[in-house]
Amino acid sequence: MTGSASSGTRSPGGRAREWLPLLKRIRDGGKLCQLFVTPEGARAIVRNLGGHGFFFVIHHAGDESLDPAQAQAFLKTLEEEDISQ
C-alpha cells in the first residue's frame, strides 16, 4: 500500500479518497495501516475515517522541510479534524 495513496493531484485529498473504502476494511479488520500521503491526503483520511489505526508518513511538496512550529500546527489541524475523537 505504500505510495499508493500519495498522489494529491485531483481533488483535495487527492487519490487518498479513492482508497477510503479499502483503508476502512483494513482498519476495521484490526490491522494498522502505514500510509505515505500528502498533507491533503492525511486530512482527507482523518476527516472521513478518523486517525485511529493509521500511521502517516507525510510527503511535503516543497524543497524545504517544515520547521517544528509548522509541523506542530499541522498535527493540531489533523487532531481537530479527526472524526474518531
Image: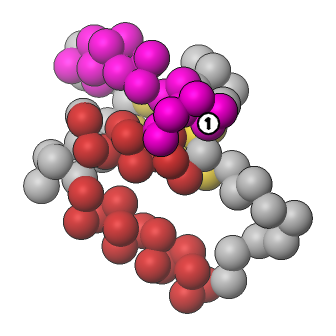
Tell me if 31 is positioned left or right of 30 in this view: right
Q: Examine the rendered structure and indicate whether residue 64 appears above or below residue 4.
A: below
- Secondary structure of the residue carrying tag 1 is loop
- Name the residue at 37% across, 12% down: 22
Is residue 40 highlighted in magenta? no
Q: Position of residue 1 (x, y in %)?
A: 59, 18
- Name the residue at 25% across, 57% down: 81
Q: Which residues are magenta?
A: 8-28
Farthest residue in the left direction?
85
Question: Is 18 or 22 nearer to us in this picture?
Answer: 18
Circle 1 Cα neighbour tier, 10 Å, few/some/many (<14 / 14–19 / ≥20): some
Q: Position of residue 51 (x, y in %)?
A: 30, 46
Q: Image quarter for residue 75?
A: bottom left
Q: Position of residue 47 (x, y in %)?
A: 27, 44
Q: Image quarter for residue 8?
A: top right
Give the residue number, with chain letter if any, for mark 1: 8
Q: Image quarter for residue 9?
A: top right
The amino acid at mark 1 is Gly
Farthest residue in the front direction?
11
- Name the residue at 42% across, 25% down: 17
Question: Is 5 or 27 nearer to us in this picture?
Answer: 5
